[in-house]
Amino acid sequence: MSATLPAELLSESQRAEMHDLYRHLHAHPELSMQEHRTSALIQAELEKAGIEAFRCGGTGVVGILRNGDGPVVAFRADIDGLPIREDTGLPYASTATGVLDDGTEVPVMHGCGHDIHAATLLTAAKLLAGSLERWAGTIVLIFQPGEETAAGAKAMVEDGLWDRAPRPEVIYGQHVMPGLAGTIQYATGHTMTQADSWKVTLLGRQSHGSQPQDSIDPIVLGAHIITRIQTIVSREIDPRRAAVVTVGTFHGGLKENIIPSSAEFTLNVRTFDDAVREKVLNSLRRIIRAEAEASDAPDPVIEELYTFPKNYNDPEATADVVEALGKALGDGNVIEVEPLMGSEDFGLLGAAIGVPSVFWFFGGHTQETLDADQVPMNHSPFFSPAMEPTLSTGVRAAMAAVLSKAGT
Ligand code: ZN
Ligand code: ZN
């Protein structure tokens, strides 16, 4: 079943209400898993629209819109901000601060557009609640905390999301990205990588820098490991398969003439295939241990910091929703792209119950911004998507996707 969307989905006052909501969310971002005011606002807005809502996974909110017999469809928006000092100069720029888990006070910004995701899904929810004659079934609205730390989807699933909400036949999600506002980008099959982050602590033996014979030097050991793990991708993985191994930090020592007792580095792995991921992680463990043994050092301590699941767009569900998006936004505005090496925890929501999911990207920039030398990307302090047509496109896409299943 499908339903044709009117050219103007929102009235002037509905559009103004969405813009107010967006500006409010943008000005008041909260860090991952601390979205207390944000989730209270979302729950209140859902309940005001007559939609049953409950908390899940701490600061997550689930809205359930029931409208008789019909398909169950879920749509997810993430709601967390980032520890970034906003430098957009927007009149509604954030001056908020937050406290990280380690106690550090940091500026907070909606630097990844999750304010847009929340505002568009809330607006779509209100439109659906106000047009019960146009569809039938149940819509599960998932407002997920903590995407940026890979904690939120996991927290919601572990808090019984799928025991408390009806099982959907498909789960949709969307993310604003640099790209022309009004357009959608999607991939079929592999869409975003799985990511694994580790902290590795190298143990040595401290000595005076002039007496290396008394030391086990963890810095020399670290240098060997970091160089050698670059051969995993170049020498051990089939070149037709994608993998990335990046060492992002390396710390050790306090003074040039002391060989320290330990050093540490953090690394990040990106893969699409489960088999490739296993291979890379096993090779990392093997090289880290073997190099320590070659240095006569104790086994290094490997700590898994976090894991992002993969995002796989079910081909059949993708083809269905792409057709609906093309009708809603114009076929030329829905563009197939290569998978992204970035990661997202969205995929976990469907994988947890074996339900297919589809995740796409919508542009947030004007042509003028895209033509500039430096396009402000997600996570930049200058990230400032054009409010329109970005927000209206997000609502239109969400409505088209949901109604492609539940429309009458
Ligand atoms: Zn982000
Ligand atoms: Zn994001």
Image: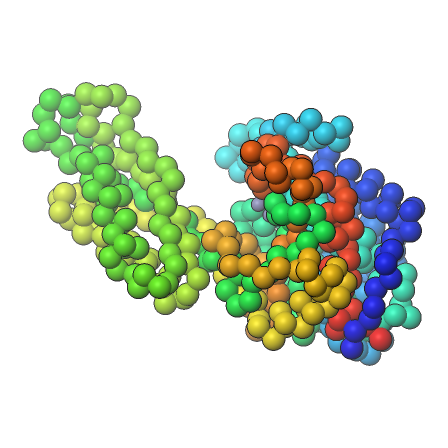
Percent from the top left, x then y, of residue 247?
35, 43
Percent from the top left, x then y, of residue 242?
39, 59
Query: Is the residue 191 above or below the residue 210 in the image?
Result: below
Position of the N terminus by quadrant: bottom right
Query: Is the residue 197 above or below the residue 50 in the image?
Result: above
Query: Is the residue 325 above or below the residue 198 in the image?
Result: below
* Closer-to-camera residue (136/30): 136
* Closer-to-camera residue (177/37): 177
The residue at the point 90 percent across, 64 percent down is 131
Percent from the top left, x then y, of residue 162?
65, 68
Task: Using residue 203 as the reference point, say whether residue 106 is left or right of it.
Answer: right
* Closer-to-camera residue (297/404): 404
Task: Examine the image and state in which quarter residue 252 appears.
Answer: top left
Q: Is residue 398 something one can see in this rendering?
A: no
Q: Is residue 148 something one can see in this rendering?
A: yes
Percent from the top left, x then y, of residue 18?
82, 46
Task: Examine the image and state in which quarter residue 160 appears.
Answer: bottom right
Task: Using residue 50 as the reference point, say whether residue 59 is left or right of it.
Answer: left
The residue at the point 86 percent across, 44 percent down is 17
Total numbered labels: 0
- Which residue lies most toward the left here? 213
The residue at the point 26 percent across, 60 percent down is 236
Task: Using residue 2 as the reference point, say whether residue 49 is left or right of it.
Answer: right
The residue at the point 30 percent across, 47 percent down is 301
Q: How is the image coloured?
A: rainbow
Position of the C terminus by quadrant: bottom right
